[in-house]
Amino acid sequence: MDQTYLLLKSLHIAAVVLFLGNIVITGWWKFQAGRTRNPAIIAFAQRQVTLTDYVFTAGGAAALVVTGMGNAVLHGMDYRHIRWLTWGYWLFVASGLIWVAVLIPTQVVQARLARAFASDGQIPQRYWELDRLWFIFGVLATIVPFAAIYWMVFKPA
């Protein structure tokens, strides 16, 4: 097997670990911080969620695209006509759309609210409404890439 293929595949797997690992752990820490109802803890967690999403989730997503598409193109695999690649690709895109359309805008507003309540100690109801929205769409945006893993690993015909 071509060494370029194996190198890109290894980097692709590392990107999956970075991408999904950050999504799962970020959601966990945000959920746990919210359970404390402590404004300082929630504000700190919210800042970290936003930061880690920009660095690790976006970085992992970029690495996934580069390594996945790079390997497909370099090795003559047309993702539009190979069923498992098509499903994996579009599930990844669907997760990205959820992040761009709902999760990132929601957490940007939450981060602004958190900066204010970190100093005055009053968490507004709007924060909790957005938190519920973030949680629901966050679960969905996490399940979808796991479905993509199924297609990538099992490669059903």
Image (cartoon, grey):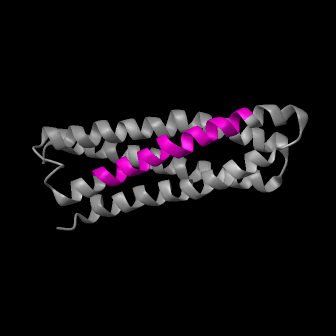
What residue is drawn where x is 72% and y is 55%? 32
Q: Nearer the viewer, residue 140 or 13?
A: 140
Instruction: Say which quarter of the image contains residue 97.
Output: top left
In the rendering, at what x and y percent does residue 52 appear? 58, 37
Q: Is residue 82 magenta?
A: no
In the rendering, at what x and y percent does residue 78 appear? 13, 47
Q: Is residue 79 left or right of residue 43?
A: left
Instruction: Say which quarter of the image contains residue 73.
Output: top left
Q: Nearer the viewer, residue 10 or 75?
A: 75
Which quadrant is the C terminus positioned in? bottom left
What residue is drawn where x is 20% and y is 41%? 71
Instruction: Say which quarter of the image contains residue 44.
Output: top right
Q: Nearer the viewer, residue 128 or 35?
A: 128
What residue is drawn where x is 85% and y is 47%? 38
Q: Is residue 92 left or right of residue 106?
A: left
For residue 147, above or below residue 70: below
In the rendering, at what x and y percent does residue 137 appear? 55, 54
What residue is drawn where x is 89% and y is 39%? 121
For residue 42, above or below residue 153: above
Q: Which residues are magenta?
A: 89-112
